Structures are given as structure tokens and as C-alpha cells.
Image: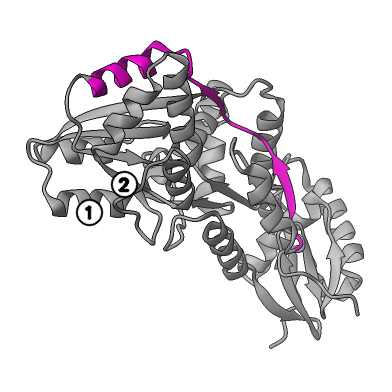
Amino acid sequence: MTEVLPLAGFVIGITAARRADELGALFVRKGATVRYGPAIRIVPLADDTELRSATMRLLEDRVDAVVATTGIGFRGWVEAAEGWGLGEELLDRLGKSSLLARGPKAKGAIRAAGLSEDYSPASESNAEVLRHLLDSGVDGQRIAVQLHGEPLPYFVDSLRAAGAEVIEVPVYRWVGPADPGPLDRLLDGVLDGSVDAMPFTSAPAAASMLAVARRTGRLPGIVRALEKRVVAACVGPITAGPLAALGIPTVQPARSRIGALARTVSDALEARSPRLSAGGRSIELRGQGALVDGQWCDIAPAPMALLRALAESPGRVFSRRELISSLPDGGEEHAVETAIGRLRSSLGSPKLVQTVVKRGYRLAVDS
């Protein structure tokens, strides 16, 4: 028997701009199908007046601490300063401050610039960097925070509330995707039931996805799907913010890492995969298909939607009218009959789904 990988049958939708291929590869390796729909794109700010203004403000006076959140952002900042003829002055000022690196890539960028970090948390999380600063005492200090494509309001506001003057350094910013087509198709997949999970790696990507859904009239349906059927996973609480604001539940890894995020999604999908016994066979639902006695069965969207509905209450009789509402495109009772016929064929046994005369259909669960 051919080995069935743990995520076979599941479709993962990825909206990330950075490291999308790396995240997707983690799912493909486990057998999942990945659909990409970038919700944002990152624009460097080498010539941006905001970045230069923040740099000049930093150079005006002493800086007690500088937080580097990403390697690419820190390098871009130094390169931009060099282009303005301020490279040496910036490095001198940074060298006289306490440098904090969120993770190994930011640490590497600091060292590549000829500097050395004073602190870098094992968790690679902004939350631990913030806790370190607050525990050290920041009242009266000037602190620069290199942003990584989006604002960090909780981080910055917490420092200011503790008495620090904070200089936000926006090294790059995010804008909408150059081609919105892939994101539109990904949203359609969420609505029609052909996407099983949506992992998010940044708050801007989540916010942009929701904004597109709202602008195109699809937001209510997207929210319902993410609340009930589709796993919404976020790399951390800041990323989850736009979804939480709409009441969408999310799963999050203990560590804010892409690998941990992929494992969290895998665990959540496995936990949501119904396993039951019907017609003397074991059945495990897997996103867009099912394992029947360990044998993989591809199932088309409409029959799969009916199998999910029947599996919610195994053994219960569902009327044709009830099952119509489960079909991706709705329809009439004839559409249910057609989908049931295709489902039986896909499962390889007509006995797994029983017809109850004048009442409807049920899974033939074993007593």
C-alpha cells in the first residue's frame, strides 16, 4: 500500500510576501497542496523621507538602545544611510548604544556591520525583547525601534508608557499586491470549501486579506469560513490582531517561528479530521478527500461537502433540503442526489452512505 503523507488531501492558502516559498515547502513536504495568494508586497524605503527623517532624529542626540527586528531591515537601513553619506555617523551612534537583536538574522546583520549585539532572546520574539527592556528600566531613555514592514503599536506604546522616548525607524513598508488575481482566487477557495487552512506570518497580510474581502463583498462569508471550517493560524499575537478584531479564533505556536507555525497548522488539521467506522470500514476525512481503510480517495468539492455534513452527526438522517445548504453552490434536491451518487463512487462502496426512504441520507456507522 502506498504511504499516505500526514497532510495529504489538505489545501493550505498562503498570503505571505516574505518567505512564502519556505513556508509552503514545509506543507508540501507533508503531502499538502499549497495555493499562494500574496496579500501584500514589501517596498524598500531607501529613498523614503520617513526613513531619512527617523535617521536624522536618531543622530541628533544620544540613543540608549536600538532594537533590530529583522536582518534585511537592519541591512537596508545601514545601506540607505551610506547612500545619504551618513553611514559612518549612523554606525558610530549605533555602536555607542545597547543593541538588541530579535533573532539570529538581525544578530547576523548587526555583526556584518562591524557591531555587536548586547541581547538577543532565545525565543526570537519581540515580546521577550520588550520584556527585557522594561525589566531593565527605560524611563528617560531614547530608544530606536527598527520596524519590519508594519507598525508595532503594543511594543512602542509600552515603552512610551514606561517613560521612554521612542524613535520608530520604518525601513520598508507594505502595499497591496501588484497582481490581486491570486489572492482573489484564494478567497474564492476559502468560500467554496477548497481551502482548509490559512497560516498568517504578518499582521499586514491578514489585514490586507480582510480588506480585499470587505471591498469585494466577501467578508461575511470569509469570517464564517475562518470561524468554523478553515484553520486560521498566526505566527504570534500581533499577527492575529486583525483577525481577533473580527472575533475569528486562531491557533498560534508557542514560539514565533515559521517551522513552529507549520507544525501548529498540521496539529490543528489532524485534530479536526473526523475518524469513524461505517459499513465495516474505517474512514478518515482529510480536507479534500478521505482515507478509507488506509486507501486514499480523491473526492470532488460537492460530494466532499456532503461527506463533511454527514460526518458531523454520524448515523443521523439528513434530509435532502438540509444537505442543499452544505453544497458550495446550493441548488435543488436533484443536486444532492447527484452529489451523493458521486460520493458513493469516490468512496468505492455504495453501502457507506445509506438512503433512508422518504427521509434522506445517513452514514452507515457501525454500532
Point out the stretch of residues depicted in magenta. Answer: 31-59
Q: Residue at x 85, y 69 (%)?
A: 296
N-terminal-most mark, 1 or 2: 2
Q: Across the whole image, how many numbered discs are drawn on residues?
A: 2
Which residue was labeled with disc 1? 132
The reply to whether callout 1 and callout 2 are in contact (CB within 8 Å) is yes
Q: Quadrant of residue 145?
A: top left
Q: Is residue 39 magenta?
A: yes
Q: Residue at x 25, y 24 (%)?
A: 58
Amino acid carrying label 2: it is: Leu
Name the spot of residue 28 as percent of width and height, x first.
74, 56
Quarter holding the C terminus?
A: bottom right
Amino acid carrying label 1: it is: His
Q: Residue at x 48, y 28 (%)?
A: 76
Provide the secondary structure element on which disc 2 rests.
strand
Name the spot of residue 300 as percent of width and height, x first.
83, 52
Provide the secondary structure element on which disc 1 rests.
helix
Name the spot of residue 26 as percent of width and height, x first.
67, 57
Which residue was labeled with disc 2? 100
Task: Look at the image and tell me whether residue 141 can be seen.
Answer: yes
Q: Quadrant of residue 110?
A: top left
Q: Nearer the viewer, mark 1 or mark 2?
A: 2
